Amino acid sequence: MKIRLHQFLSKCGIFSSKNEIKNAIWDGKITVNGSIVKNISFEFNPEKKKVIYDKKELSLPQNEKYFLLNKPMGFICSRLNSQERKLGKKSIYELFYGRVSKIVYESLITVGRLDENTTGFLLVTTDGKLAHKITNPKNKIKKTYYIETTKSISLEQIDSIKNGIKIKINDNGKMEEYISRPTILTDIEEKSMILTIDEGKKREIRRMFDSVGNEVSKLHRLSTEKMLLNDYKLELGEYCEINFEDIDRDVFSNIKTV
């Protein structure tokens, strides 16, 4: 799996800051397969190409870290840029700052994303391969959500969402259309339900309900495959470290992955 050069160097743990990494790259002190690379965003497969700095071959740490977070409301799943800081945005990565080592903190990524107003089950890890495996749509990993709506849910809306519905997206003037995959709906009440879907497009569940003339007022992810958030007794904003074996057993045990 490919990784950006600056991310690789961050994970190696030999640099004390991002600026030190950038300067090492820009000063031509990093070679990849014998060639000097001055592009911090250069992508390569560290399993196939050799990285040298100060006459030493660098490698990624072998011990990956895995965390399960009960994501709170009002947090985004990306690192904050300067504009987001000015706007007072909050990032889930702030919940880990100072509580894990600097090497781990710099290497953390989320396994997929929950939007700012969605809560619940979120895996956070240093393992890019695992993240890709779970988020790859070809693997059809099921995620289950508790949903509340602003309006009563009609039988027509249930049928449309269950069978797949056309979703139109206007992204900065660029129109996109697709049909959502069929979903599993259970525990259906007047304004709430449990929904399971094996697709993870951006804001998809909210867009599904928008498309049928309803609106999601609460969205909380309960699980990924057989890995249940409730089993870990985490309050909103809390996380715990978990083992890869737990993920392998509960997420991949009955799934053929690519």
Image (tube, rainbow, N blue to C red):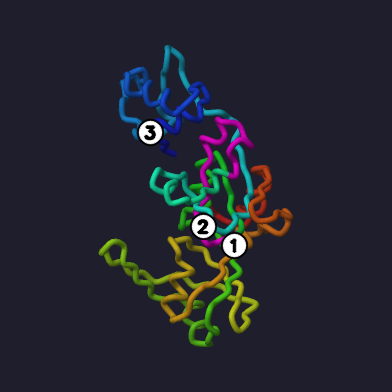
**Does the stretch in magenta take in 80?**
no
Amino acid type at mark 3: Phe
Dot label at residue 221:
1
| Badge nearest the viewer, 1 or 3 | 1
Quadrant assignment, res 36: top left
On the image, the x and y values in percent for residue 43 come to 36, 35
Q: Which residues are magenta?
A: 95-119
Q: Are marks 3 and 2 in contact (CB under 8 Å)?
A: no
Marks 2 and 1, Cα distance to the nearest angstrom? 9 Å
* Relative to 157, 237 lies left or right: right
Q: Quadrant of residue 1?
A: top left
For marks 1 and 3, the one nearer the N-term is 3
How far is disc 3 from disc 2 in space, using C-alphas? 28 Å
Q: Which of marks 2 and 3 precedes in the sequence?
A: 3
| Nearer to us in this view, 55 or 208 | 208
Of all residues shown, which one is farthest toward the top?
Answer: 55
| Percent position of residue 225, x then y | 61, 59
The residue at the point 55 percent across, 85 percent down is 152
Classify mark 3: helix, strand or loop: strand
Q: Earlier in the sequence, mark 2 or mark 1?
A: 2
Label 3 sits on residue? 44
Query: In the image, residue 130 lies at what x, y percent?
Result: 54, 45
| Frontmost residue, 82 versus 214 | 82
